[in-house]
Image (spheres, helix red, strand yellow):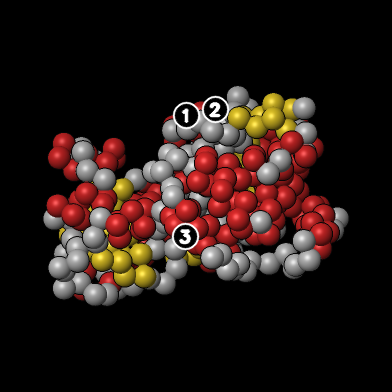
Amino acid sequence: MDHINFPYRSTSHLALMHIVAECGAFERQNLDVDYDKPIGREDAHRLVPTGEIEFTSGNHVSTYAARVRGDNWVYLGQSVSLNHLNLVVRADSEINKLEDMRKKKFGSKGRHPGLNDWLYLKQHGLDVDRDDVEFLQFGSVTNDSERKKLNLIEAVKTGAADGCFLSQPKREFAEREGLKIIPLESQPMVFFATVSSSLPFVQKHPDIAKRMLKALIDGIAYIKTHPQESIRILMEKHTKEGKLDLNTATKLYNELAPTLEPKLYPSLEAVFNVYEEAKRQNKEAEKIHPLALWDFHLLREIDDSGYIDDLYAKYNMKAQARAFPVS
């Protein structure tokens, strides 16, 4: 059995990885995967290209400019291409739609999540660069000592921000705190868990990379076809975003399961949007084609072999994204 390091870039990615591990998908591919540990952006940039870390689940934006400087980062597959967002505001607020955030204080958090927020606002007529909204960062990425102490739910509750974007399970936590939830159109985006590696590692160990992709494809099929079991795993294992009861775990499952990509191909609109963020972060990214970091040859081999269709045939369903009702 091959021991593999696959640290996460965001605790949210563990909602997928816990189920892949617990359903036995890694073991079926003869992989012993150490996935339940975090890695920072800079450490990922340092350790993945050298092969000290075989895979990680993120670094979606900074890699484009890094490629200009000779970086060998490569994306092999993408678990999700849609970012489900909800506008969260105070219950007594007169904000009832996104446009009502104009000239209000918008709370954001994190580098890539912050860029997601910037792009979504801009694409919906609220340009931060035109001061259509006051864009405020909270948590670890800000130098403001007061905002550093607050998470986004606290920021909205206390009035430090008028609104923010949240997805599950944080949407459910916000609603339980008495905040108002305004559902929004989903955002095409490369985010959540990505199979990120380095080109030299993939070239040297194509069998391991292929088995990793097959394990995730297997785990996603399990999630889509075993809702009750998946919800139980979320309740038992997915605790780093907050303890989930049955109701919260079910809502997280219902948001995640239909969105997971059965064949791990990202949508082109999602790739385009993350590329826009890469250019926003560093103009050097303009020198790199949006698809230059993506290598689908192993996915294509798996797909052409019939592995994915056979997997779903076993569960009497097609390999496509679809919702499953959960009581």
Left or right side of 210 for 154: left
Alpha carbons under labels 2 and 3: distance apart: 35 Å
In-image side of 111 versus 57 (left or right) = left
The amino acid marked with disc number 3 is Lys
Q: Residues within 10 Å of mark 2 (few under 14, many from 20)?
A: some
Q: Of the residues shown, which amino acid type is indicated by label 1?
A: Asp
Residue of label 1: 43
Give the spatial CA distance, label 1 vs label 3.
Answer: 33 Å
Task: Kindly report which numbered mark, 2 or 3, lies closer to the viewer in this rendering.
Answer: 3
SS label for mark 1: helix
Q: Secondary structure at mark 2?
A: helix
| Residue 95 visible within the image | yes
Q: CA distance from mark 2 to mark 1?
A: 6 Å
Location of mark 3 (residue):
251
The residue that label 2 is drawn on is 47
Amino acid type, callout 2:
Leu
Q: Residue at x 52, y 41 (%)?
A: 236
Dividing the image into 4 quarters, which one contains the C terminus? bottom right
Q: Nearer the viewer, mark 1 or mark 3?
A: 3
Residue 86 location, quadrant: bottom left
Which badge, 1 or 3, comes first in the chain's sequence? 1
Q: Position of residue 162 (x, y in %)?
A: 18, 61
Picture quadrant of residue 223: bottom right
Q: Bin the neighbour count of mark 1 within 10 Å (Cα to Cα): few under 14, some 14-19, many 20 and up.
A: few
Asked if the residue under mark 3 is in contact with the one under mark 1, i.e. CB atoms within 8 Å, the reply is no
Q: Is the C-beta separation of discs 2 and 1 under 8 Å?
A: yes
At which x and y percent is residue 281?
Answer: 37, 49
Mark with earlier residue (2, 3): 2
Compared across the picture, whether 91 is left or right of 198 comes to left
Dot 3 crowding, Cα within 10 Å, few <14, some 14–19, many 20+: some
